[in-house]
Image (spheres, rainbow, N blue to C red):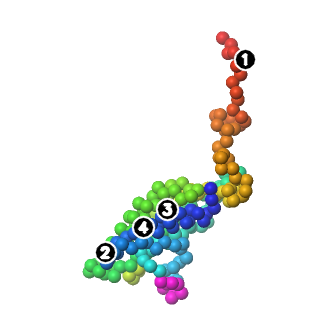
Amino acid sequence: MSGIKQPIQDILNQLSGITIQTQENQNSPVYARVWNNQIRQMEDGKGYDFPRPAAFLEITNPAPYKALHLGFRSADLTAKIHLLHDFYNADGTLEQDLGIFDLRDIVISVLTGFCPTACGPMNCISEDQAYDHGNLYHYLLDFVCNFTDSKGSPYDPDAGMYDDTANPLLDQSTISGGIPGPIPDPDPEFIIPQ
């Protein structure tokens, strides 16, 4: 199990592994980082010039958690992916960047069904395109996955009480039809009356 940092790193690693062909017919890796409103900062002259194509990951909050058992908790996390792509009218179709849709398709195919650490499979639930832009295109994809947080549990590996030989959520007391207690041994003396 893990806290929230590891799933974020897992998603960023998946995004970093994507390459896309640029207008110059060069393969370019996607620049993947955590979202910090880089577009606004770039427009205000306060941010840094980052490579494009880029994919920024934003975990939208608040995420309502439900208590499970033994300090574990669970939530459906929404991972908003901000796709950024430059387009400079290379083919005479000013303001028509079809390359952003290639990037969208690749990201959906890479992340759909992907299970970050302590998460269920990711699924794209919505998408949106920013329509007021210059040469920088902005496309948004929202993925959802269930996340189980173990950081409040004594069974978290970092808590010092973790035993990796047994699953604390599945012990022998619940295997026999959900009846608490040890699995009973059959009594060889017991005879079914006829």
The residue under the point 65% across, 34% down is 176
Rate crowding at label 2 as few (under 14), some (14 to 19) or many (20 or more) other CA atoms within 10 Å: few
Q: Name the residue under label 4.
A: 18
Q: Earlier in the sequence, mark 1 or mark 4?
A: 4
Q: In this picture, is 82 found above or below 187?
A: below
Among the 4 quarters of the image, the one containing residue 61: bottom right
* Dots 4, 2 in contact, CB < 8 A: no
Q: Earlier in the sequence, mark 1 or mark 3?
A: 3
Classify mark 1: helix, strand or loop. loop
Residue 124 on the magenta segment:
no
The residue under the point 42% across, 77% down is 52
Q: In this picture, is 100 found above or below 164?
A: below
Rate crowding at label 3 as few (under 14), some (14 to 19) or many (20 or more) other CA atoms within 10 Å: many
Instruction: Find residue 56 and report its horizontal and vertical position in percent.
Output: 50, 72
Q: Mark 1 points at which residue?
A: 189
* Dots 3, 4 in contact, CB < 8 A: no
Left or right of 70? Residue 16 is left
Q: Which of marks 3 and 4 is nearer the N terminus?
A: 4
* Residue 71 appears in the picture as rendered: no
Left or right of 104? Residue 183 is right
Q: In which quarter of the image is the C terminus?
A: top right
Q: Which amino acid does label 2 sit on?
A: Asn
Q: Which residues are the magenta region? A: 42-49
Q: Mark 2 points at which residue?
A: 25
What is the distance, in whole Å, between disc 2 and disc 3 at their CAs? Answer: 30 Å
